[in-house]
Amino acid sequence: MSSKMSLQKPIKQYYNEVEAANLLSISLTALHEILDRHVFSHDNPRPDKIEFTYSELLLLSVWAKPERGDNILEMPRR
């Protein structure tokens, strides 16, 4: 689960796609890929606009892998 996501009471009732991606520490493109792969299908395509509850974001966090920035360097193993 993303370090930003917790089981604490959410601040808002609904989150838009940009807010959801930020909470999950992923890009909007990555969020759309997760939704297309795990939630929606060819017969039931992703709508143009989606809002999420905090509970739904907690579930999506299982599939979300936070993206590393270009400015992060891995330290060599000793």
Image: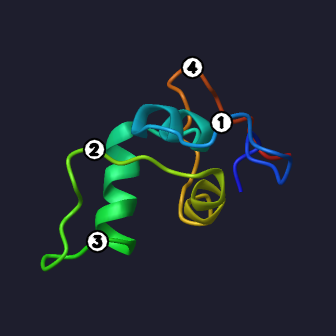
Residue ID for mark 4: 71
Q: Mark 4: which secondary structure?
A: loop
Q: Residue at x 73, y 34 (%)?
A: 11
The label nearer to you, 4 versus 3, is 3
Q: Please name the amino acid that badge 1 sits on.
A: Lys
Residue 42 spot, x, y in % from top left: 13, 76
Q: Image height check: is 17 above or below 64?
A: above
The label nearer to you, 1 versus 3, is 1
Q: Residue at x 65, y 36 (%)?
A: 12
Q: Please name the amino acid that badge 2 sits on.
A: Lys
Residue ID for mark 1: 12
Q: Mark 1: which secondary structure?
A: loop
Q: Earlier in the sequence, mark 1 or mark 4?
A: 1
Q: Residues within 10 Å of mark 2 (few under 14, many from 20)?
A: few
Residue ID for mark 2: 49
Q: Earlier in the sequence, mark 3 or mark 2?
A: 3
Q: Residue at x 56, y 53 (%)?
A: 65
Q: Which of the two residues, 67 or 31, is positioned nearer the viewer here?
A: 31
Spatial CA distance of label 1 from label 4 is 31 Å
Q: Mark 2: which secondary structure?
A: loop
Q: Please name the amino acid that badge 3 sits on.
A: Phe
Residue ID for mark 3: 40
What is the residue that sits farthest to the left in this orientation?
Answer: 43
